[in-house]
């Protein structure tokens, strides 16, 4: 793809949790539009496989976003290697433990929020720091969840972290607009990814949920390629502070 509003030639994008599922779909879409993409994940083998599947425009780093020092150093390395940072997709996350309220310890709660909320916050903060210093504007995107729109019994840490991202994004959009930096959240619905493997293998879950899916299928990583390119590109220059629902119509039914 070359020329036009969606051309990302010369663009540098970071995708955390980019070695599978939604993150990999976004990374592929960004590279297909011409962006140089850096994938972060904690599984070195999957990182390498993901980067190889995308091609020459992709690199990968082992970074645990729940570790502030690793995030800070990782972003310094990305900017140092590429000379710029144009978009950051804070997508890394852990699934909910799905424990009843009275069985959920504070340690259980913090195990999820360490990555899903704290890790995403630090990633967005450090990306914004570099974007401000570089002075070229940019796009920050946080992967939230459809679950913030409804009650999810047993998913307290997960939904709290994803709800927190929505409000963080709104604050980022207001504070960072003066620097030409946009911030938006994605609210994915039921999508084939590591965190949904157990649910999709459960016949009862499939029997109860699939009839509520107007498109009659689960989402795939590829379904998020287009929105990633849009949010990274100049086509979204007036789009900030939003939460974009991509769920196959589930919430509408």
Image (spheres, helix red, strand yellow):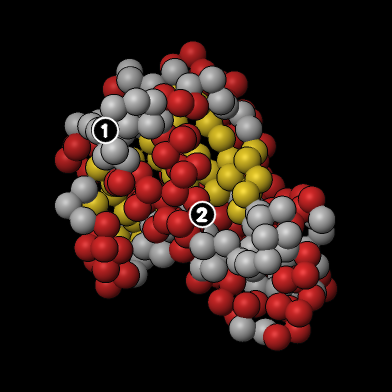
Q: Look at the image and tell me whether residue 214 can be seen.
A: yes
Against 214, residue 142 (above or below) is: above
Quarter holding the C terminus? bottom right
Q: State the image coordinates of residue 202 (x, y, percent, origin top left).
A: 67, 84
Q: In the rendered image, which quarter contains the N terminus?
A: top left
Q: Is label 1 in a helix, a strand or a loop?
A: loop
Residue 72 in which image quadrant: top left
- Identify residue for label 2: 223
Viewer-proximal residue among 27 and 71:
27
Give coordinates of residue 34: x percent, y percent: 27, 39
Q: Which mark is residue 37?
A: none
Label 1, label 2: how far apart the Cα atoms are: 21 Å
Which residue, given by chain and number where applicable, does mark 1 sit on?
2
Quadrant location of residue 20?
A: bottom left
x then y, percent, for residue 28: 35, 53
Check if mark 1's residue and mark 2's residue have beta carbons within 8 Å: no
As helix, strand or loop, the secondary structure at mark 2 comes to helix
Q: Residue at x 26, y 63 (%)?
A: 53
């Amino acid at each position: 793809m070359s020329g036009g509003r969606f051309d990302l030639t010369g663009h540098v994008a970071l995708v955390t949790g980019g070695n599978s599922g939604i993150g990999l779909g976004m990374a592929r879409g960004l590279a297909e539009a011409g962006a140089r993409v850096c994938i972060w994940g904690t599984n070195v083998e999957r990182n390498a496989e993901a980067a190889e599947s995308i091609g020459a425009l992709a690199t990968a780093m082992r970074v645990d976003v729940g570790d502030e020092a690793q995030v800070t150093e990782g972003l310094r390395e990305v900017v140092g290697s590429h000379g710029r940072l144009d978009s950051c997709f804070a997508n890394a996350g852990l699934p909910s433990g799905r424990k009843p309220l009275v069985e959920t310890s504070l340690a259980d709660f913090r195990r999820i929020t360490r990555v899903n909320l704290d890790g995403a916050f630090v990633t967005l903060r450090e990306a914004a720091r570099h974007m401000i210093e570089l002075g070229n504007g940019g796009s920050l995107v946080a992967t939230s969840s459809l679950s913030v729109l409804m009650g999810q019994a047993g998913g307290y840490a997960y939904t709290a972290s994803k709800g927190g991202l929505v409000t963080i994004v709104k604050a980022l959009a207001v504070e960072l607009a003066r620097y030409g930096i946009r911030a938006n959240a994605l609210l994915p619905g039921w999508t084939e990814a590591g965190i949904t493997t157990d649910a999709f293998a459960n016949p009862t879950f499939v029997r109860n949920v699939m009839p509520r899916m107007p498109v009659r299928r689960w989402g795939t990583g590829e379904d998020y390629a287009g929105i990633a390119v849009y949010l990274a590109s100049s086509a979204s220059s007036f789009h900030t502070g939003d939460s974009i629902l991509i769920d196959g119509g589930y919430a509408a039914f």
